[in-house]
Amino acid sequence: MKNSEIIHKFTGDQLSCWPLACENFRALKNVLTRELEVGGLKVTLQHNPARMISSAAKLSKADIAKRKCFLCRDNRPEEQIMLKFEGRKGKKYHVLLNPYPIFPDHLVIAEARHTDQTIWNRYVDMLDLARKYTDFTFFYNGPKSGASAPDHHHFQAAPKNLMPLERDAGNSRVFLMSQQDAHLYHYQKFTTGVFILEAETAKSAAKLFYRLLDCVEIPEGENEPMFNLFTSYQNGIFRSIIVFRSRHRSHHYFSDGPDHLTMSPGCADMGGMFIVPVPEEYEKLTPELLSEMVAEVSLSKEEEAAILNRLTRTQPAVQVGIMSGKEIEFEILSDGAGPRKAVLREGKIEYDGALYDELYFDARTASTMFAEPSFVLHGVTIGVNFHWERKEDQKFAGALKIIVDKDKLTAVNLVGVEDYLLSVISSEMSASASEEFLKAHAVISRSWLMAQIASARGRHAVEVPAEVTDLPSLMLNLDTRFHGATSETCASGAVEYVKWYDHDDHRLFDVCADDHCQRYQGLTRATGKTVRRVIDRTWGQVLMHDGKLCDARFSKCCGGRMERFSTCWEDKDHAYLQPLPDTPGNEEGLPCFCDTQDKEILSQVLNNYDQETVDFYRWTVEYGRDELADLIERRSGHKLGEIISLEPIERGESGRIYKLRITGSEKTLTVGKELEIRRILSESHLKSSAFDVEMIPEKVILHGSGWGHGVGLCQIGAAVMASKGYDYRQILEHYYPETTLDNCNEE
């Protein structure tokens, strides 16, 4: 028996034993219909009194909580029977007859478990349903888009081509973009925000579908955009029609005047089949009144234009080194095979019983801004050498490459720059921070990244489409692990070395994922609608100085004054990185922005583990003399004997020491620069090198200020500025004077 025949038999069996459904399906044969024209599309009005139960449904969270879920198996009528359908990843669905039909053979496909209405991870199930039941169109009402059961995930289905929009979908459309064998079109009639997606495979259809959803604003309190969705399958082609919305109901629904309409548009309505439960309204509807209602629940022209812009804009690609080791445990989520392991074996990668020079796993979806994870890496170390160092499992979108890097394996995530920044902004600080502060940080993080890519590759990064499936081959970076020189004067036993760590020490990828570069933790930290909005509104914006990308450094807290570049890294300076006071107008003597204990502001800046550090503007560290001598020996490799003195030889203008003489009873050690000093004087990293030394019997006390190198933007200071009403451009001008904003994606 064909699948269509199975459905027809199922419908007949159901109507024979369920009087309510039988009565409503009989009434459907006698409903009144008439045609009107809306936006150039001939639409149908259907007078259907039985649909009042859906049109007038109360859908507030409180109202939903009061009722029993009528899609849960335990709450269904005894007469209601079902067919079973199994979706991807073991999801189970029940195919049911809709007892309040709009169409012949009107079905509801409810997930077996009680879970919220969301298309996430279920679009491919919808495609599979369409391929199995080719005589039907499957449709989906998103939350506040006509779904009368937003608390229980479900699709609906009706015989194909009954809705006017569906019949006209091949006309009046403009091609927008492709994703492998999937093609996206903009439909030009009826209303705004209508898109048509056609694809040969479910995989490419899903990639392009989620790419589209990624370009649409998500209403506050919701998990996905507002939209209606229609999907069918014919002659080897999937077709989805997506109608984006701005409102659930128009003002006509709430009006007490003559323009009142008891209509709550769902898929059928936005597909051109308008369901009118009240006879008086059926008679009075005009093209003008219906057009007005449709316009109110649809996107504005400006919202539509924003989607089109997001779809077509580009972003450079970045290669992020995530973790290294003799073996890497990972999971490719699209294959359902569970955790797997790659092992270094004889200079190659042993995987699944074979040896490889390189492993590559394609991106599951084209963007992280809405995309489901492509892969998981297990046991990723974060906070390397910091006091909060730990391991965690992390999820990533984009592609995964595993390569051999000398005597270890390295996992590299290939992802778009803007998608990368979503995680960076959420990882470097709280995703709930103020929008202006996050905008400023998005610009400097993007600027720094693009400068690193340009420097490492020896050219400006090549623009690629926002999808990240066809990224360029890995480019070799510089092979320098640290910079500086070491000299030893044997006669005196004195040792001097100056050492600094910069970001050009990655040979096989652009940047790493930890604090050495910028914190990047994939989808594990890519959170918050505010961060999405910040990336969207600063897309491509970078800081420029004298026609060049700015090396826009930043730290947690400058301690009251910013520092010069040369204090921490090579002996050169940038005009836009100046040792200015962190005060209004950079005026001396005024209260510093970063001198704050405001818990609300600090909670915005300090993300999770960062909040384990509570003293940052001014701080004190104490060591016993023997404890300090042991620490220095372990961290430097030099046995100095009893510590006699710690003498700052050279300081930057913020007070940060960049050359420190440590005198011991057996040897003298002179150390530079800033980070190396911090590294030697701490089990992890001293908060900063801006400290004074107090030597007392049996103890050495360091009185310090600031957290980090202090160069460029002070994160806590910037957050305080945002709380005082400064916008992101003013914040950037404060910390990076003489710079301009440009767009790295424009010629």
Image: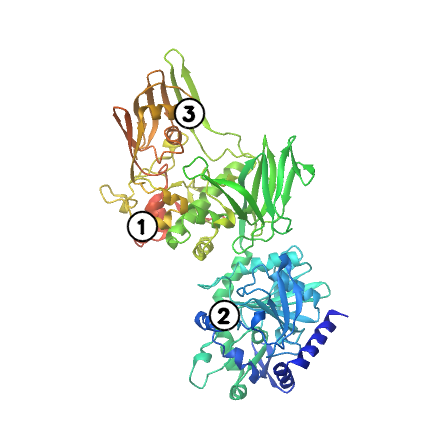
In the rendered image, the vertical position of residue 717 relative to residue 290, given as above or below: above
Query: Disc 3 marks which amino acid?
Result: Arg
In the structure shown, which secondary structural element does the residue marked by tag 1 occupy?
A: helix
Pointer 3: residues within 10 angstroms few (<14), some, or many (20+)?
few
Mark 1, residue position: 599
In the picture, measured across the screen, residue 351 lies left or right of residue 583, that is right
Residue 634: assigned label:
3
Q: Position of residue 707 (x, y in %)?
A: 35, 39
Position of 200 with respect to 51 (left or right) is right
Query: Which quadrant, please, contains the N terminus?
Result: bottom right
Outermost residue, left side: 589
Do residues under tags 3 and 2 come within 8 Å of each other at their CB atoms? no
213 lies above or below 188 = above
Residue under the point 57% across and 64% down: 113
Q: Considering the numbered disc 2 on the image, is that residue within a helix, a strand or a loop?
A: loop
- Relative vertical location of residue 620 with respect to residue 606 in this rendering, above or below: above
> Could you give the CA–CA distance between mark 1 and mark 2, rounded to whole angstroms?
36 Å
Residue 208 quadrant: bottom right
Which amino acid type is marked by label 1? Lys
Which of the labelled discs sits on residue 104, or is there none?
none
- Name the spot of residue 653 as percent of width and height, x first: 30, 33
Dot 2 crowding, Cα within 10 Å, few <14, some 14–19, many 20+: many
Which labelled disc corresponds to residue 144?
2
**Residue pictured at 66% horizontal, 79% vertical:** 104
Q: CA distance from mark 3 to mark 2?
A: 62 Å
The answer to whether residue 168 is seen in the rendering is no
Judge by depth and name the residue closer to the eye, 671 or 459: 671
